[in-house]
Image: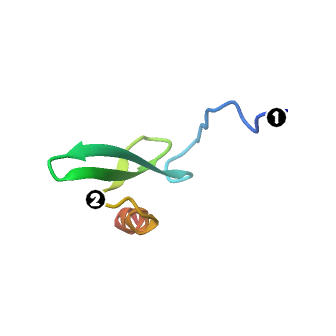
Amino acid sequence: MRGPKTHDGSIITEKPDDIWVINSTGCVTDEGNATVVVVDVHCTGEYQGVRAALSGTRFEAMECLREAI
């Protein structure tokens, strides 16, 4: 049996740059499968970094984060 949730699924910040999130998704291109990684500011929803690559490794996520910083 699972315990209680730690939160209700919504995170609300009061000012920008409190929380950044990294999201990734897969897509199909003419060259095969690809991964798109996005870093966005949780409060405003604006994207700080975007990266697309054929391999969706942690290194691609770190490059996206470096771009955002």
Contact, mark 1 vs mark 2 (Cβ under 8 Å): no
Picture layout, residue 42 above or below residue 5: below
| Numbered tag placed on residue 2 in the rendering | 1
Q: Quadrant of residue 6?
A: top right
Name the residue: 25% across, 44% down. Answer: 28
Picture layout, residue 24 above or below residue 9: below
Quadrant location, the N terminus: top right
Q: Whole-percent x and y of residue 66?
A: 39, 69
| Numbered tag placed on residue 52 in the rendering | none
Q: CA–CA distance between discs 1 and 2? A: 36 Å
Q: Tag 1, which secondary structure?
A: loop
Dot 1 surroundings within 10 Å: few (below 14), some, or many (20 or more)? few
Q: Tag 2, which secondary structure?
A: loop
Q: Which residue is mark 2?
A: 54
Name the residue: 17% across, 53% down. Answer: 31
Name the residue: 37% across, 53% down. Answer: 37
Which residue type carries mark 1? Arg
Dot 2 surroundings within 10 Å: few (below 14), some, or many (20 or more)? some
